[in-house]
Image (cartoon, grey):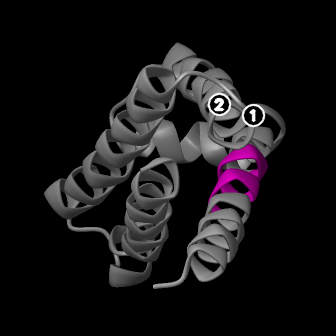
Amino acid sequence: MKPTAIKITYWVTTGIFSFMMAYSAYGYLTNPMFDQAFTHLGFPAYFRIELAILKIVGALVLILPVASRLKDLAYGGFALTLVSAVIAHLNLGDAPNHTYMPIPFLVILVVSYLTYRKKIG
């Protein structure tokens, strides 16, 4: 892949992913439906707030020029969050549209990470 294509792929996937994480964090903080969803999954109410804050911080880390180690930590945290969401929904036998919704975002995250690593050499 050419360096320009790598940069474009990186910024497109990172932008989409960061926007979606920030948007979901906004929903966690403002939409009562998410409070019910977290209760349904068996999580305490404060976890929704913590996760929203960490999603905002993580999205900023991915798009701002920060140390590579910090970006790696954000990528790992997001991967853990998305995989955990699938497991939590599978555990409860939720509908496939809820259970598998995080998987496309995980794919976008992986593409962002791989192109990030290529971009920095």
Cα distance between the residues tagged 2 and 1: 5 Å
Please state if 92 lies on the left or on the right of 66 as rendered.
left
Labelled pair 2, 1 in contact (Cβ < 8 Å):
yes
Q: Position of residue 60 (x, y in %)?
A: 73, 33
Residue 61 is tagged as 2
Dominant secondary structure, magenta: helix
Determine if the magenta segment contains residue 19.
yes
Q: Which residues are magenta?
A: 17-23
Q: Position of residue 95 (x, y in %)?
A: 35, 78
Residue at 76% in and 56% down: 19
Residue placed most toward the observer, 80 or 114: 114
Residue placed most toward the observer, 7 or 112: 7
Please determine whether, in this image, residue 92 is positioned above or below residue 79.
below
**Callout 2, which amino acid?**
Val
Q: Position of residue 69 (x, y in %)?
A: 42, 23
* Disc 2, SS: helix
Q: Which residue is mark 1?
A: 64
